[in-house]
Amino acid sequence: MKKVAITGNIGSGKSWVCELFKQRLGIPVYNSDDAAKQMYFQPEVRQQLLHRFGDAVYLSDKEINKKHLAEMVFHDETARCDLEGILYPALFVDFGRWTEQQCAPYVLFESALVFEKRLEKRFDAVIMVSASEQTRLRRAMLRDHCDEAAIRARMAQQWPEEGKRLLADYVIWHEHDDEDEALMSQILVVHDSVLVNS
């Protein structure tokens, strides 16, 4: 089965595009952010994290210490790489198992950081969902109840849109929130191309 990554910077509307792939075309979508949160509680991952970072990583059996972990990896590049070295292998094992359970011509792996984490080679194709900076700012501010400075700080952690669009196999432009049919026409072009190139 073909594996296709779908990515997009903050506020691009990537999640809604994924929802349309799922609702209208029946394409299964693996949300890597949601799945990664569950990886922390897999026994092997938990054991490795406790060994590397200590008991302070977990607040309880069902809750990680997000603040503590974020502070550690933000200030220490080695710690960040170690964390990703524990989480990503477990995530892709889970993705592989999930993929085997699907019945579709291809699956989507949803992640904002496909290019930043050099994951593109794991997939048969990459779709980039894009929008203007002002649209992305507006969406993210509304969704996360943050001010512009906070969103721009998060934008700075991601690669520029222009570079990602050049690297992607397909680009879906999602500028207007109320134009699903126009969006769907782009999705269908991508869908047909993925099927043809399967």
Image: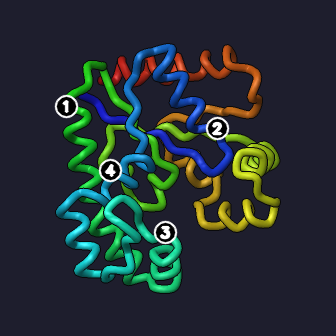
Dot 4 or dot 1: first in sequence order is 1
Question: Where is residue 48, by image quadrant?
Answer: bottom left
Quadrant where the N terminus sits is top left
Q: Quadrant of the C terminus?
A: top left
Q: Give the foreground label among 4 and 1.
A: 1
- Give the residue pinned by disc 3: 66
Q: Callout 4, which amino acid?
A: Lys
Who's the residue at 20% across and 71% down the image?
47
Q: Circle 2 — which element?
A: loop
Residue on which disc 4 sits: 121
Real-space Cα distance between discs 2 and 3? Answer: 25 Å
Along the line of sight, which residue is nearer the eye, 30 or 197?
30
Dot 4, how many residues are within 10 Å of its Cα: few (below 14), some (14-19), or many (20+)? few
Q: Which residue is mark 1?
A: 100
**Structural distance between the alpha carbons of marks 4 and 3:** 29 Å
* Camera-side residue of 86 and 12: 86
Of 177 and 47, the residue lying toward us: 47
Q: Quick check: 172 above or below 143?
A: above
